[in-house]
Image (spheres, rainbow, N blue to C red):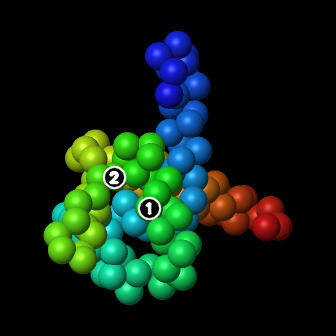
Amino acid sequence: MSPHVPLYQAKAELFRTLGHPVRIRVLELLQDGPRPVRELLADIEVESSNLSQQLAVLRRAGIVTSSREGSVVRYTLATPDVAQLLLSGRRILASMLTEREDLLAELRDSGESV
């Protein structure tokens, strides 16, 4: 990334990088610590080539790091802040759903058709 990229643009690129279900699932699994690719494959149940592609995107973005131990490649979150970001996303979603449930209950209580 160029040093002259505005911060808002860099943030948008980060969120674009996170904007894939397989990448999010990988990051969720890595919150518990380093994982070998074979475990990620077993837990995510996608084609090996698809997982490799998504891991490469995360690695290029600096969101995960990899290390090789013999024939085993392990992936790790580059920073614990990634886990905090995922937790924040979960909290935001929960809040949004709670607000929608409250609105739905209010509509039902008012006798309006839903």
* Front residue of 1 and 20: 1
> Is residue 39 visible to the viewer in this orientation of the structure?
yes
Mark 1 element type: helix
Circle 2 SS class: strand
Distance from disc 2 to disc 1, alpha carbons, whole Å, reads 8 Å
Residue under label 2: 64
Type of residue at label 2?
A: Val
**Residue 24: image location, x then y, percent:** 46, 61
Picture coordinates of residue 4, whole percent (x, y): 52, 13
- Residue 106 vertical placement versus 68 (above, below): above
Q: Are marks 2 and 1 in contact (CB under 8 Å)?
A: yes
Q: Name the residue: 49% across, 79% down.
A: 48
- Answer yes or no: is residue 31 visible: no
In the image, farthest residue toward the front:
70
Residue closer to the observer: 42 or 59 = 59
Q: Specify the amino acid type for callout 1.
A: Leu
Number of numbered markers: 2
Query: In this figure, which residue is indicated by the disc labeled 1?
Result: 55
Seen at 33% across and 52% down, the residue is 64
